[in-house]
Amino acid sequence: MFNFLFDAHQLSDFLGSGIGLSVPLIFAAVGGVICERAGVFNIALEGQMLLGALAAAVGANLSGSAEVGLISAVLTGALSGVLLSILGVSLRGNQIVIGLAITLFASGFTSFMSRVLFPEGANSLRLDGFRPFGLPLLENIPFFGKILFQQDALFYLMLILVAVTMFVIYRTQLGLSIRAIGENPGAADTAGVPVMLLRYSCVIAGSAIAAIGGAYIVLAQVFLFSDNITAGKGFIALGAIVLGRWNPLFATLACLLFGVFDALQLRMQATQPDIPAQLFAAMPYVISILAFVGLIGLVHPPAAGGKHYDREVR
Amino acid sequence: MTLDHFVRWMYALKGLWAVVAALIVGAFLVVLAGANPLEAYAALLRGGLFDYYGFANALVRLCPILLVSLAVIIPLRAGFFNIGGEGQVYVGALFGTVAALYLPQAIPAVIRLVLICLSGAVGGALWALIPAVLKVYRGTNEIITSLLLSYVGANVVGGIIHVYLMEPGAPYPYTREIPFDATLPIFLPRTEAHIGILIAVALALIFGTVMKRSTFGLSVETVGHNPVAAAYAGVSIRQTAISAFVIGGALAGLAGIFEVVGVKYRLFDHFSPGYGFQGAIVAFLAGLNPRTAIFAAMFLAVLQAGAGSMQRAVGVDTMMVGALQGLVVLFVAVGLAFRYRPRVITASAPQTPAVGIVPANSKVPE
């Protein structure tokens, strides 16, 4: 059952598919970390991924170019971020309710729009997506070259994104301000940090990044759109954020863990026909829950997470 | 009537405004799909409300949506999000179906039916107990666990059907048909309208009273609005949270088993068209009021029952109804964000309570 772990070729195939499956989660989780670090809960990750997936399919289909698909996904995600910030930051609505509402809206809206925009059926699309290409020299590294450096453009974008997010959050003035408004917006405001502006920027950027996660599924994995194509990945990403303790790199590692288990269950479905596929399909969710419950010791979420900031009632 | 009164009064009708706004935006979607919105809405109403079979069909859809919405409302009044109604529906349906298939025929039919429904409720309650216990004793975020458990529940139930309960030779996983005397009686002749619908509506009315007038209801409200005060008054927050979750899960489980013994007479793999989420939509639309939830659930049910007529009449895909539901919940959220705050100048102004929805605090103090 687990022989493939001892065969270099099969193992690299397996890890490659695990990493591929974790990429959408990583985009969503990093987007979520950026929002939550600034003190705004973003439960809408799932919905934003879904909106991003549809926008990517529409953009790529109309223009015939994957890049346009990616840009329309980013813009759609950003738009949902604007909505979340206006309702949840400025108007001080309950961010959990608004996030859920965006997710519920996205689920119905994308299913309908895909029928309107693709009358022949969105799941018979054959989009021109991002295809894997090797990075010169790096791809020749034995074993790891194939896994890490023979991927598509969005994968490399993800690597850059994680590195940049880590750098900005922990090594720059901007990152310090972001962490400050997530912990104590009153104090940050006193020190001259523009709380509202930064919260808006973080939510909009984070939402756009989450939407890329949805776009990745469409433009680099399946090249079509189907109803609820994200299948709860946004919720798994939420778990990864907590498991990664609101640190982009650790959240990425948590997503990798979930992705590898997803690859494992897909492999089991194929190789163990006697055991019903559904039990394997449940595995990534069970693993997420177990990791979420078991591996967490003391968690310190951003202290002002989900709390509204009003200058006049400090 | 002063302006202040007027604004308050208008605000009290926010659910209605959300529906109106959703219908207006939905009209643009219908135009986008190349049809006349008025004709589409007329066909929707004709098919879902003003037609004997359509109305009965709407009632059939009302039943699970209403019960799952109660499963969201009751814990949320205590400040806990049970968004995992979907999983509880599946596990409840599984428990009930096993009882329906394996309880000895010697037991009188009525008692057997009651036992079947109770097993369904127990199944749902057990599935809801997991996020509740994790939340209360480990502080694990119940939104994430209950959501993820939905996917686990749906798949595990599917797997169990596949391995143990599947009808031999069936093209995809579903169970044997349950014995006829273990099904719910029909109350509208020549339709599928089973008495589970009446039970669901009765339960909504009962919980409307329970939440207002009983010790349990008051404990839930207090924990939801001010856990510290509740603890000070001697209310056990843990107990209240767990009971609210368990009652909610039991109602969702009931929704699941009613679908089996009332409508389909078999347990199908992945039979739920998203009752968990639809229940959440109704809960928000109803402002967490169990009685209002009857009307909110009926609204969704009429939309769904009329969707087919709309598609036949004007050629707009039935999924339009899904988009409408999404728009409704989005506008409910907008309405909540725009809640009416009278201008108070003093800096120490008390925080306006969250007008009927989502009690302020969902943290469990130790």
Image (cartoon, rainbow, N blue to C red):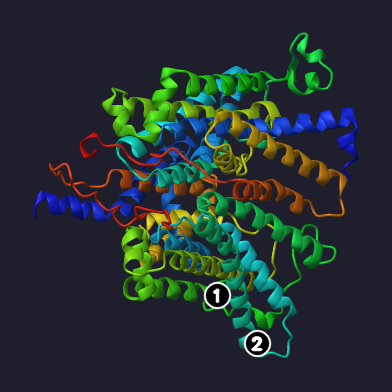
Q: Can residue A113 be seen in this view?
A: no
Q: In which quarter of the image is the C terminus of chain B?
A: bottom left
Q: Which residue is drawn at 39% across and 61% down?
A: B77
Answer above or below: position of B259 versus A173: below
Give neighbour class at mark 1: few <14, some 14-19, many 20+ (Cα, 10 Å): many
Q: Earlier in the sequence, mark 2 or mark 1?
A: 2
Mark 1: secondary structure: loop
What's the residue type where badge 2 is placed? Ala
Answer with left or right where residue B229 lies relative to residue A64: left
Mark 2: secondary structure: helix
Q: In which quarter of the image is the N terminus of chain B?
A: bottom left
Answer whether labels 2 and 1 touch (C-beta < 8 Å): no
Q: Mark 1 lies on which chain?
A: B
Q: Which residue is drawn at 35% across and 57% down?
A: B287
Q: Residue B305 carries which label?
A: none
Answer above or below: position of A58 versus B237: above
Q: Nearer the viewer, residue A170 or B295?
A: A170
Q: Which chain carries label 2?
A: B
x%, y% of residue B318? 54, 48
Answer with left or right where residue A260 lies relative to residue B318: right
Question: Cα distance, mark 2 to mark 1?
Answer: 16 Å
Answer above or below: position of A293 versus A219: below
The residue that label 1 is drawn on is B194
x%, y% of residue B270? 67, 56
Q: Is residue B190 visible?
A: yes
Q: Which of B325 and B343 is in front in this view?
A: B343
Q: Which residue is drawn at 22% across and 40% down?
A: A313
Q: Residue at x 30, y 37 (%)?
A: A309
The residue lying furthest to the top in this view is A136
What's the residue type where badge 1 is placed? His
The residue that label 2 is drawn on is B109
x%, y% of residue B85? 54, 59
